[in-house]
Image (tube, grey):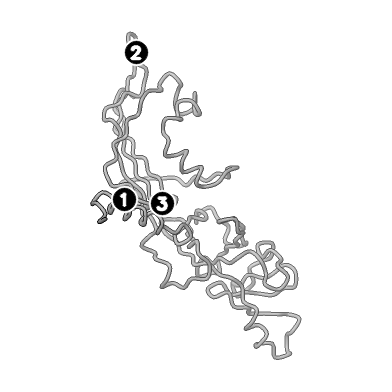
Amino acid sequence: RQATQEESEAADGADEWKGFDWKRQWYPLAFVKTTDKDVPHRLELFGEHLVFWWDSLAWRAMLDECPHRLAPLSEGRIDEAGCIECPYHGWAFEGSSGACTRIPQLEGMGNSDVRGKCGGTVFRVVERQGLVWVWGERGLSANQADEGLIPVCEAMEDPAFDWIDVSRDMPYSADMLIENVIDSSHVHFTHHKTISKRENAKPLPLRVTTKITPSGFEGTFQPNAEVAPTGEGATNVKKTERSTKYMAPGYMHHRIRSTGDD
């Protein structure tokens, strides 16, 4: 039989979700202002360890293992040419291509052919809005990593706004953190007596204003929701207008405007 319109739309939607590739996305590594440019840094992405560093011109990233004996490059140093140097035998690697630039044990022995076979594994890296971003798939050139997928925070492009950079190491995965940030209803309990109070807990109706896709969604919360205790004797009652925007895989933006006595 011929598929109904509803069945066809459901099939198209399923294909859309299957087509989302988590590795063909950009991930923030660190804040530029608070990252030491004089030493290499280690982090984990998709269960793999990466090393990233500043080579005097740009941020670079490679798989955190020397192709020689798999020593962690992040425990080495940045040499005078901006290459990452292995701490074990001193092999050095250029960050834009991963090419091996130096094998001290073969100096003066015509080692260019050997070095040509000893490159490391690179990752595409760019800097945007004060963050260092890495493309999740290894070895891609500049043309294959779509920089248009990097989320842009519009407020940070507006000179009327100020912001601060805050980072924290957490003992769980990034996807769990995103789920936590999307779920505003936990704030009154998890953050009791810090940024909220248990007695302020109440329903937070969210109206999704865009189609939910693998790339994300946008929505608004019930307008004029009270965010302080109500009833007889209540003081300093505030109301809030809230909207939220999620862009996969790692951008979550809550916009909150409160009114009331301050």
Q: Which mark is residue 248?
A: 3
Q: Nearer the viewer, mark 1 or mark 2?
A: 1
Say whether marks 1 and 2 touch (CB < 8 Å): no
Q: Position of residue 183 (x, y in %)?
A: 43, 35
Q: Are marks 3 and 2 in contact (CB under 8 Å)?
A: no
- Marks 1, 3: nearer the viewer: 1
Please state which amino acid type lies under the numbered disc 1.
Answer: Ala
- Closest to the observer, 248 or 130: 248
Please report the residue visible at 58 percent of the width from the left and 45 percent of the height from the top.
Answer: 169
State the image coordinates of residue 171 (x, y, percent, origin top left): 60, 42
**Type of amino acid under label 3:** Ala
Q: In the rendering, which numbered label is found on residue 10?
A: 1
Q: Amino acid at mark 2?
A: Ala
Which residue matches tag 2? 234
For the point 62% across and 76% down, the residue is: 119
Is residue 112 rendered to the left or right of residue 228? right
Secondary structure beneath label 1: helix
Residue positioned 29% across, 47% down in the render: 211
Q: Measure the alpha-carbon separation of dots 3 and 2.
A: 40 Å
